[in-house]
Image (cartoon, rainbow, N blue to C red):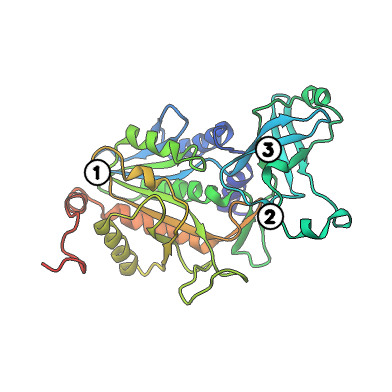
Amino acid sequence: MDKDLTLMKELTEEAGPSGFEVRMHALMRSKIEQITPDIVTDHLGSIVGKVGEHGPKILLAGHLDEVSFMVSQITKDGFLRLQPLGGWWGHVMLAQRVKVLSRNGDLTGVIGSKAPHVLKAEERKKVVDISQMFVDIGASSREEAEKFGVQVGDPIVPICPFEILPNPRLLMAKAWDNRAGCYVALKTLEAVRNEAHPNIVYAGATVQEEVGLRGAGTLANTVQPDIAFALDVGVATDTPGMNQKDESQRLGAGPLLGFYDHSMIPHLPLRDFVIETAKENRIPYQIDIMPGGGTDAGKFHLASKGVPSMVISVPARYIHSHVSIVHRDDLEQSVRLLTELIKRLDEKTVEKIKGMHYGKSAYDRT
C-alpha cells in the first residue's frame, strides 16, 4: 500500500462523530504538522494549516465529522437507544456493526434486527423507525452496560475497514463523507507548499458539518478568507435504481462542481473561473445540482461581507451509510484542480472576482 493509500486508510478508519471529533482533530493536526508548522484553529475544533505569507487568503476545508450516533438511553436490559448525529435512513442501519466510544474504551456492538422468520407481512414493507432501533453490546442489564463504561451521551460510529477493491482505483471505506475532503485538503496543502503561488492558503477541516455546518461558521470568522472552497463528497448516480441521465455523476469522471444545493448557489465569477481553469488544464469535471442537503460553503459564503465560495466534491456511492466507495482518480483530479486554482488566484484576480457580482458574463446583456 503506497503512502497516499495509507493516509486514506488512516483518515477513513478513525472515529470522528459530530461533536466528538477529538480523535480526527488530533490525526489531522499530526498530518498538517508534517507539511507546515503554521496551524490555525477555532474554539470548536476546526483546524487548518497555513502556507504562504502574502496575498489573498484562500480557504480549503473538508470536515472532520462523519454521520454517527449518540447513546440516548440505556434500557433496563442493557440495550442502547440511538440519537442520530446527521442524516440517516433506517434501511441502511439494521444488523450493522458499530463502535461505542465509552470512557472505558471502545466497545463493539450491532444494531439489532428481527429475523425474517418472525416478521409479519406488513412489517416487511416498512422502514423501521430509528427511534425503535437499539444497539446490542452484549450487556444483560443497565448496570452491566454502565460497568462496561457506557453512559448516556456517548458517541457511536459505524465499523467498516478501508479496502481496495479488485479494480484498484475503487476504494471502499466508512466515512468517505468527508474524509475525502480531508484527504484532498492535505494533499493540496502539500502540493502548494512546493509551488510558487501568490496567496496565503489555509487548508484543513471543520467540525460539526453533519449537524448544521457549525464549524464552518466559526472557522470562516477565524480565517476571514477572501475565497473559500468547501471540499466534500457528492452523490454518485451511476448505480442501478438511481435517477440516471446522460449527465449522471459517475465515479472516475472527475470532481463535482457544485452549481446548486440547499445552502448555497455559488458566486458566479468564481464558478466561471473554476470552469475555465479546469478546461485550460484538461481536468475533467462534472456538474452537481443537489436539491437537498448542503455543505460548509453554505456558511463560508455568508461570513463577513460575503465570501465568494465554491463546492468541489468527489462523487461517492452509498454515502450516509456504514460504507461508501470513491474513485482514486477523482481524488487526484480534485487536488490537481485546486492546485491550479491556487496558482492563479493572485490579488488582482481575487479582487476582480470579488468585485464582479454580476459582471460581464453570458448572463449580462448590457
Residue indicated by mark 2: 91
Question: Which of the labelled discs sits on residue 210, or is there none?
Answer: none
Ranked by sequence position, the earlier of labels 1 and 2 is 1
Residue indicated by mark 3: 82
Q: Is residue 57 above or below residue 311?
A: above
How far apart marks 2 and 3 lie (CA) works out to: 15 Å
Secondary-structure class at tag 3 = strand
How far apart marks 3 and 1 lie (CA) works out to: 44 Å
Marks 2 and 1: in contact by CB < 8 Å? no
Secondary-structure class at tag 1 = loop
* Mark 3 surroundings: few (<14), some (14-19) or many (≥20) residues within 10 A: many
**Which residue lies at the image location 41% right of the left edge and 30% below the top edge?**
42
Q: Position of residue 143 (x, y in %)?
A: 82, 22
**Looking at numbered disc 2 in the image, what kind of residue is underneath it?**
His
Quarter of the picture holding the N terminus: bottom right
Q: Which residue occupies the extreme left position in the image?
A: 366
How far apart marks 1 and 2 lie (CA) works out to: 46 Å
Question: Which of the labelled discs sits on residue 56, or is there none?
Answer: 1
**Looking at numbered disc 3 in the image, what kind of residue is underneath it?**
Leu
Marks 1 and 3: in contact by CB < 8 Å? no
Please name which of the two marks, 1 or 2, marks the residue nearer to the observer. 2
Horizontally, residue 198 falls left or right of residue 140, namely: left
**Looking at numbered disc 1 in the image, what kind of residue is underneath it?**
Pro
* Mark 2 surroundings: few (<14), some (14-19) or many (≥20) residues within 10 A: few
**Which residue lies at the image location 38% right of the left edge and 47% below the top edge?**
297
Q: Position of residue 293 (x, y in %)?
A: 47, 52
Q: Position of residue 9 (x, y in %)?
A: 62, 48
| The one of 194 and 204 positioned closer to us in this rendering | 204
**Which residue lies at the image location 64% right of the left edge and 57% below the top edge?**
172
* Mark 1 surroundings: few (<14), some (14-19) or many (≥20) residues within 10 A: many
